[in-house]
Amino acid sequence: MNKQWDEKDQALALFYDGGQAPVISDQRQGESAQKLIEQALEMGIPIYENPQLLAQLSELQIGQSIPTELYQLIAEILAFAFYIQGKAPENYST
């Protein structure tokens, strides 16, 4: 019996080097998606849940850059992820 998967059974990872646009670095479904999430949590990598964004990014292949129309949203997510990890720029205040 094949289990149909939905967005709860999907995960993807972005890679951002600070210079180029973020790229899809991993994309998984089913049990391996949960393993990707667990690995990220173990490494202290923040998790962001957004089914609509996941649906858009899931159309891309590993190694592809995010589309320009998502730059602003991804930049905000990355900025928040860096901030909660204590990686805010010097002299930054809220």
Image (cartoon, rainbow, N blue to C red):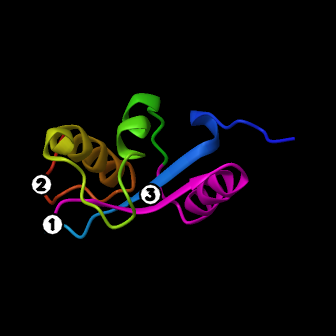
Q: Which of marks 3 and 2 is in front?
A: 3
Find the residue positioned furthest to the top.
Answer: 52
What is the crowding at mark 2: few (fewer than 14 residues within 10 Å), some, or many (at least 20)? few
**Which residue matches tag 1?**
20
Tell me if 72 is positioned left or right of 61 in this view.
Answer: left
**Which residue matches tag 3?**
13
Residue type at mark 3: give it.
Answer: Ala
Are the two marked residues, 3 and 2, in contact with CB atoms closer than 8 angstroms? no
**Which residue matches tag 2?**
91
Relative height, residue 45 to residue 56 (above, below) = below
Mark closest to the chain's N terminus, 3 or 2: 3
- Closer to the camera, 42 or 38? 38
**Residue drawn at (33%, 67%) of the image:** 63
Q: Distance between the residues labelled 1 and 2?
A: 25 Å
Stretch of the chain drawn in magenta: 20-46
Q: Quadrant of the N terminus?
A: top right
Q: In which quarter of the image is residue 4?
A: top right
Q: Where is residue 33 in the image (x, y as percent from the top left)?
A: 62, 53
Residue 32, magenta (yes or no): yes
Element type where label 1 sits in the image: loop
What is the crowding at mark 1: few (fewer than 14 residues within 10 Å), some, or many (at least 20)? few
Q: Quadrant of the C terminus?
A: top left
- Closer to the camera, 16 or 29? 29
Q: Where is residue 45 in the image (x, y as percent from the top left)?
A: 48, 58
Q: Distance between the residues labelled 3 and 1?
A: 16 Å
Residue type at mark 2: give it.
Answer: Asn
- Closer to the camera, 91 or 50? 50
Element type where label 3 sits in the image: strand
Residue type at mark 1: give it.
Answer: Gln
**Residue drawn at (47%, 31%) of the image:** 51
Q: Position of residue 31 (x, y in %)?
A: 72, 52
